[in-house]
Image (spheres, rainbow, N blue to C red):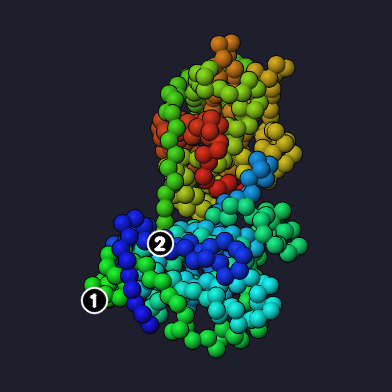
Amino acid sequence: MLDTHRVSRSFPSISLPSHGDGSPVEVALITQLGIGAGDQLLRDAGLRQAAHPAFVDALDEPSARLGGMHLAHDDASSLYSFSVGRQGHPFHRHAGPRMFTAIAGSGGAQLRFSTASDAQLADEPAVFLHALRCVDIPPDCLFTVRFGSGTWHQFVSRHPRHPALFALSCHANERSGALTEAQRARIEADSADIPSLTDTLPPVLQQLLAQADFSRVPVVSLSLQAPARSALAGLCALTRDLVGPLRVMLARLRPAQGYIGRRATRHPVQALPVPPADSLLVQALADDFDHQDYNTLTLPAHSVASRSASAILEAVLDGFMLNPPPSVGRMMALRNVLVAPLQLRTSPLGCPVSSLLSTDRSTLFAGRFPVHAQRVDAADRSADVLLGADDRHLRFRSCVRVQLLDDGAAVIALGTRVRTHNGFGRLYMAAIDHVHRRHISPAMLRMAVAHALAPELVFTVRAAASPA
């Protein structure tokens, strides 16, 4: 074949006109990554993709839907990830147009497209091969691809030791194109995935393709650091071929995981010697108790979005379950291990609110939180609930309260009373009293209020129910 090249001072790119009446195929290189970085990035991204709740492994193209449609806001777009391994994937097409950004593995990738229309293929199936074009992508490269509805395509690795690519694909309009009734139904139900939106090559074209000689198919080679078939490009490809697997081996020494941070205003917590006289906690264990604490947190008026005390209380109770302090979670995990041989009650949540995980549904606040008692005043400016559980060594009751002040501020409180049953109970309370007062209760109150102020930032998973 005749090899030629030209210099591009911008992103090296190609626009392949459609053989039928569709949109062109557009491919552009963006930047070159570090030597061997492609294999490592594909390995890490593939592991994270496999752990995604919407992961699907089909058609040799593992994928996950990262973001669905928002039809209530007239947004029919979706975002997917997908990967192609060493063996490539079969020729297929989609009803709608596609555009994606991808990273090539350390062996490079070849993108194959046939833009023959259905009418042309019906007249003469061999048009599929006449319209076939290939684009070579160099190793360890970031690139973009865009093509129209119904474009047949196949992506393969240029080297059998390396995966082909990992991509993020934006479906600008999930409803577009010549969809089947089954595909449209899944889209309208917002349950579509890449395999369900894919049409594979019909048998007559598969047979034709099996006999094809790809050495005779026109190829466009894009590159960034040297002409594709130069000695320098060959040396670069050899180096990346050797380093890619090494970087993957080193990457196995650390887990493929990420972190989600959350920052919230640290409101001061004030400890009161006794609960207010009108608190539900005063009525609990009134005749005898061995421990009592009561913490309050005051939110300024500009932080309080709702004028309903019960609505704020519901959000705070959600916060106790969905946004517990990690340090308290670790303490509870240790405590559960230590007391399990004694057949004491265990819970993943801090004890003051652990009864929120109770399976007893006899008394519910807001229709979903199990409580011992609840109270909301007529004006909905004060609301509190009484929580608690009984165990072999002690009985505890906790009160969570929200009060709206005349100046618009809100006071949110968490208080606890404990009555011990035996010597072990008294020893247990003596051991945890200091850390409970100084850290556990204040931290739980802060984190629950942080969730109530910004529930959209929640990223923890609701704890599984445990027996009360």
140 horizontally vs 345: left or right = left
Q: Position of residue 461 (x, y in %)?
A: 55, 48
Q: Position of residue 96 (x, y in %)?
A: 62, 60
Give the residue drawn at x 65%, y 28%. 311
Q: Is residue 55 above or below residue 2?
A: above
The residue singled out by tag 1 in the image is: 231
Q: Quadrant of the N terminus?
A: bottom left
Q: Secondary structure at mark 1?
A: helix
Give the CA separation, mark 1 to mark 2. Answer: 22 Å
Residue 75 seen by the camera: yes
Find residue 281 and report its image quarter: top right
Give the residue drawn at x 58%, y 46%. 462
Q: Is residue 272 above or below residue 198?
A: above
Residue 395 seen by the camera: no
Q: Is residue 461 above or below residue 28?
A: above
Residue type, numbered disc 2? Ser
Q: Is residue 102 above or below residue 415?
A: below
326 horizontally vs 311: left or right = left
**Of labels 1 and 2, the one closer to you:** 2
Kindly indicate whether the residue at mark 2 contacts the one at mark 1 (C-beta within 8 angstroms): no
Specify which label sits upstream in the sequence, 1 or 2.
2
Q: Quadrant of the C terminus?
A: top right
Q: Position of residue 152 (x, y in %)?
A: 58, 71
120 horizontally vs 268: left or right = right
Q: Which mark is residue 13?
A: 2
Q: Secondary structure at mark 2?
A: strand
Q: Position of residue 389 (x, y in %)?
A: 61, 39
Q: Residues within 10 Å of mark 2 (few under 14, many from 20)?
A: many
In-front residue for pair 311/283: 311
Residue type, numbered disc 1? Ala
